[in-house]
Image (tube, rainbow, N blue to C red):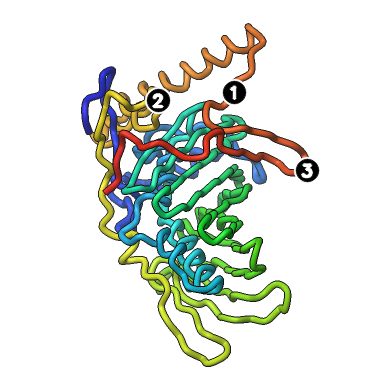
Amino acid sequence: MKEGHRRKIVVTKPLSLEGESDLDAPNLLQRILSLFKNVRPGSDLSRFQVPALFNLPKSQLQCYGESVYSTGMELIRECNRGQSPLDRLIAVMAWSISTTRPATFGVAPYNPILGETHHVSKGTLNVLLEQISHHPPVTALHATDEKENIEMVWCQQPVPKFYGTSIEAKVHGKRQLKLLNHGETYEMNCPHLLFRIIPVPSVDWVGTVNIKCIETGLVADLSYKSTHSFLGFGGNQKVVKGKIRNSSTLNVLYKVDGHWNRTIKVKDTNNGKVRVIYDAKEVINGLQAPMVKDAESVWPTESAYVWSEVSEAIMKKEWEKAREAKHAVEERQRELLRERESKGQTWISNHFLVSNTKVHGWECSPMHTSVSDAPIIAE
């Protein structure tokens, strides 16, 4: 944490394999059930207000950003170095799996405010996120690495729903990874987050992920599953299974098998050779918090600045102070909304061109060809 010119800028350790169990409080399950006692099954929770006691000390924008810039290995650059289209698809698949990060039952990041940003650099990779809608919550991401000639564009909308004994957050929207040296664009989605409340509290990534290179027609189909033994005994296996195929010939080229929090292997269907393409311990273990290099240059919309007082109070377990600070942030947003409505104004993104249609849903495109260096640096 470092002092900014107006207040503290708080950056926290990324989510990694170590988890965030120290944030759990006594009687967690009972308190969570009490939160939803008046919520009907099937209800959309995107407007649900979570008390600060149940918050991680970071915004959802920071969680999305960490999945890109907080890695122990340079997987994103490996995508560019594959000798063949198939090598590059396998590298992109490994990178996509690396964006799957552990979540903790009972705690959630802040719902970002409208126009909130998160701007971080790691080496030559510059990452910028902006909250382009508050209700519903929609996040846009643009990242560029001019040295490697790589570009990422995401537009994502999580839709959490309550089902009585569980909460499932489906993530709508697509991610694009462009390897400009090769003239290749990879489109993909991400798995959904499932919170099981009973019989055994847990949180898991589930669902199907499809990764396709538009130019080559190569496709990876991945299925995320979480297998629990009876009443939770025997552990939780975070399984990923799938295949890599040629969409034009329908030939299966590789089979994919493993666990996203351990290792992922591919098996060549032609010769039977098996190799490890992803090791979670090397990529998302022992991650360090970003550093504020230039506090004066941090934007007032930066997540680490907007939520600094809330995050600091949560980290100190000063729950009343956290509640008051969070209420102040949210009330300020209500005031700005009332102000815009009274003047007949519509909020406009500062960094993305945004559209929302019934056919295509939310879409965003960056206003600039590259992302600038950031005042917050990831190691």
* x and y percentages locating residue 139 in the rendered image: 54, 38
Q: Nearer the viewer, mark 3 or mark 1?
A: 1
Label 2 packing within 10 angstroms: few (<14), some (14-19), many (20+): many
Q: Nearer the viewer, mark 2 or mark 3?
A: 3
Inspect the image, locate mark 2, and give the three-letter code of the amino acid beneath it: Lys
Along the line of sight, the residue nearer the viewer: 44 or 308: 308
Secondary structure beneath label 3: loop
Total numbered labels placed on residues in the image: 3
* x and y percentages locating residue 285 in the rendered image: 30, 60
Along the line of sight, the residue nearer the viewer: 117 or 316: 117
- The structure residue drawn at horizontal position 34% and vertical position 62%, both measured from the top left corner, is 283
| Left or right, 288 with reference to 284 | left
- Distance between the alpha carbons at the discs numbered 2 and 3: 36 Å
Secondary structure beneath label 1: loop
Secondary structure beneath label 2: helix
The residue indicated by pointer 3 is 359
* x and y percentages locating residue 27 in the rendered image: 36, 46
Inspect the image, locate mark 1, and give the three-letter code of the amino acid beneath it: Ile
Q: Residue furthest right?
A: 359
The residue indicated by pointer 2 is 326
The numbered mark, 3 or 1, whose residue comes first in the sequence reads 1
* Circles 1 and 2 in contact, beta carbons < 8 Å: no
- Distance between the alpha carbons at the discs numbered 3 and 1: 22 Å
- Distance between the alpha carbons at the discs numbered 1 and 2: 24 Å
The residue indicated by pointer 1 is 348
Quadrant occupied by the N terminus: top left
Q: Nearer the viewer, mark 1 or mark 2?
A: 1
The numbered mark, 1 or 2, whose residue comes first in the sequence reads 2
